[in-house]
Amino acid sequence: MVCEFRMNSYEKKMATLLRRGKEIHGVVATKAEFEAEGTRTDELLRLLEIAHRADVDIALKVGGCEAIRDLLEAKQFGVRYIIAPMVETPYALSKYISAIDKVFTADERSDTDFLFNLETITAYDHLDEMVQLACGEPGCNGVVFGRVDFSSSIGVGRAGIESEAVTSRAETAAKVCKQAGLDFVVGGAVSFDALKNMKRFQAIYLTRFETRKVVFTGNALSRPELEQALKDAVHFELLWLLNKRDYYGFIHREDESRIQMLEDRWKVLGED
């Protein structure tokens, strides 16, 4: 007997948005985070099914440079892109590469892209050394420039995310990655306001860019439907949040009547 995943109306709409995104807008993956977003395993499984229905991949940000359990789950679920956050030094990157080598065989690594977040000025100051390490064997596949955290790390905050101080450093990182043959991905507050700077990155080198929940190929910036693509990405995230709210709301409510009945009968909690 084959068990079939039953999608609700939110999830069906999310799958439709992703499928349209792949066909028209250059969507390559949807994204989850064990780190800041705190994605639970059951949520990841639902996102995997939605991605499967839309025939797109999954990008997963793990909990840290040496998050072995996260890497094991990523391998088990067939995640395509794995990103490690807060890798600020060559030593931290070496720990990430060692963890990858421990969990994934050489054959398994060929089907997965491993990236690390460049999201602080400390990491930027070590960029050349880390790129050299990433190009080694074993190594990893690329860099994700996280603009929100980076802007905070240099003291300009989210309001300064489109500042020259952030943009020029991202351009430098793009050049370094291009020369090294590594992927260069940009994330963090990617919206209409970011498009001018995103196209500056694309003019140098841009493999992919990502919103909170949707990952696009770099050349999606050149497509005429770009504004609709970004709207669809926001729509997808809103549906995801609504779906999550209703799911956990149901779990929260499902035992309320039983709790009340037991307390009315036994008055146990009142004794506490």
Image: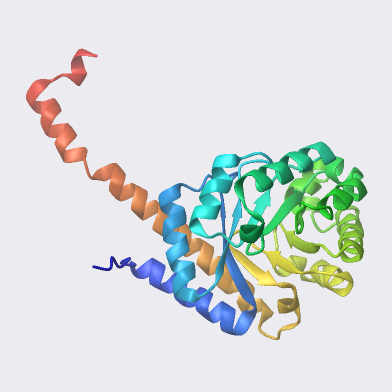
Residue 94, x across and y down, in percent: 78, 41
Kindly tell me whether residue 37 is visible in this rendering.
no
Q: Which of the pair 105/267 is nearer the observer?
A: 105
Residue at 80% in and 53% down: 137
In the rendered structure, the answer to whether residue 199 lies left or right of residue 256 reads: right
Residue at 60% in and 62% down: 80
Residue 198, x across and y down, in percent: 80, 68
Residue 243, x across and y down, in percent: 40, 59
User: Does residue 35 lie above or below 217 as drawn?
Assistant: above
Q: Quadrant of the N terminus?
A: bottom left
User: Does residue 126 lie above or below 261 as drawn?
Assistant: below
The colour scheme is rainbow
Q: Quadrant of the C terminus?
A: top left
In the rendered structure, the answer to whether residue 177 lies left or right of residue 53 reads: right
Residue at 86% in and 58% down: 170
Kindly tell me whether residue 232 is visible in this rendering.
yes
Q: Which of the pair 115/205 is nearer the observer?
A: 115
**Most distant residue in the top direction:** 271
**Most distant residue in the left direction:** 265
In the rendered structure, the answer to whether residue 28 lies left or right of residue 169 reads: left
In the rendered structure, the answer to whether residue 106 lies left or right of residue 159 reads: left
Residue 227, x across and y down, in percent: 66, 77
Residue at 63% in and 72% down: 230
Report how many numbered discs are placed on residues in the image. Answer: 0
- Which quadrant would residue 121 be assigned to in this image? top right
